[in-house]
Image (cartoon, coloured by chain):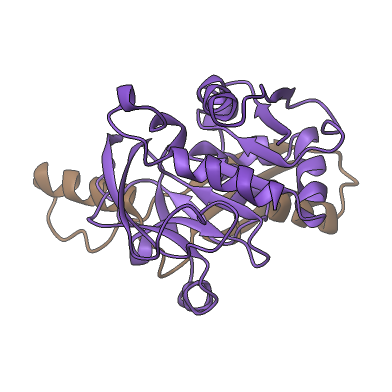
Chain colours: A brown, B purple
Amino acid sequence: MKLRIFVTLKPGVLDPQGRAIHHALGSLGFEGVQDVRAGKLIELEVADDTTDDAIDGMCRQLLANTVIENYRVERA
Amino acid sequence: MKAAVLVFPGSNCDRDLAVAIEAVTGRAPAMVWHAETSLPDGVDLVAVPGGFSYGDYLRSGAIAARSPVMRAVVEAAGRGVSVLGVCNGFQVLTEAGLLPGALMRNQRLTFVCRDAHLTVGNASSAFTRGYAPGERITIPVAHHDGNYFADDATLDRLEGEDRVAFRYADTVNGSRRDIAGILNERGNVLGMMPHPERRIEAAHGGTDGRRLFEGLVEAVAA
């Protein structure tokens, strides 16, 4: 089974990288971009019988730092 | 004082820390590889060095915080052993859950390598007893991810419990409330972005970092 884990900064956490991307888009002449937030996509190939609890554990214990990040799991 | 310095793949301040500790204590620390599952018996101080442990993959300090030796460090901290994390070591301690908050990319995205002027906050811990509260000191920083973040409730708590050890006197990296170093609840774990081991003799341009190690020696002897 293939998993796609999306790790994103929590709302309210400043994202300096997103801001730099936003600024660069403006420099390229792309107007109307209101906000940019950068995150991570982590793809896992796991055994089909991997439980939701185990997946959640991987996210909470390592893949995301829940002090600053949220995560969302997509099963492909 | 018996000290141990951790060594991860990618650590690059481990030797500087060892030199500083030996200069102040007269005793060379044990260098402990990340794959070890225990610390030397009777250790008084565990120092977690700066660098780029595991290439800072995933997040700075994230992989190092899950390495075998860190289980022993968490256990030692629970027993009251002093734990000092400098720079990448601070990142490792937050990732390991020994200190609250997280260290994010510097606000201006650039690597900052220069002297930082700091104001001492808590001056009663084993690490900071050599300083006076409110004292201005100068210690160098060298980091890309030193922008301290914690939510308002956590920041209020850190301030209310006098757990901010050092603040930047001017903006260095965008850290919330100018936090440069914090203590855990019990006061035996300190994480800081500036490098005290790089300011221990006159040839370094000053000795403001030396008192941190001297304070630890006094605290252990007391």
Relative image position of residue B210 (x, y in whole percent): 45, 38
Say whether residue A30 is visible.
yes
User: Please, is residue B202 above or below residue B42 in the view?
Assistant: above
Q: Residue furthest front?
A: B222
Say whether residue A69 is visible.
no
Depth check: give the residue in front, A66 or B26.
Answer: B26
Residue B71 found in image quarter: top right
Residue B169 found in image quarter: bottom left
Depth check: give the residue in front, B126 or B14.
Answer: B126
Relative image position of residue A65 (x, y in whole percent): 60, 54
Q: Residue at x 50, y 23 (%)?
A: B16
Q: Residue at x 38, y 46 (%)?
A: B105
Residue B152 found in image quarter: bottom left
Depth check: give the residue in front, B132 or B107.
Answer: B132
Relative image position of residue A57 (x, y in whole percent): 78, 54
B118 on left or right of B74: left
Relative image position of residue B221 (x, y in whole percent): 70, 47
- Count every numbered label the image shows and give the total: 0
A32 on left or right of A66: left
Q: Residue furthest right?
A: A49
Q: Residue at x 80, y 34 (%)?
A: B68
Depth check: give the residue in front, A28 or B91.
Answer: B91
B49 on left or right of B141: right
| Image quadrant where one finds the N terminus of chain B | top right
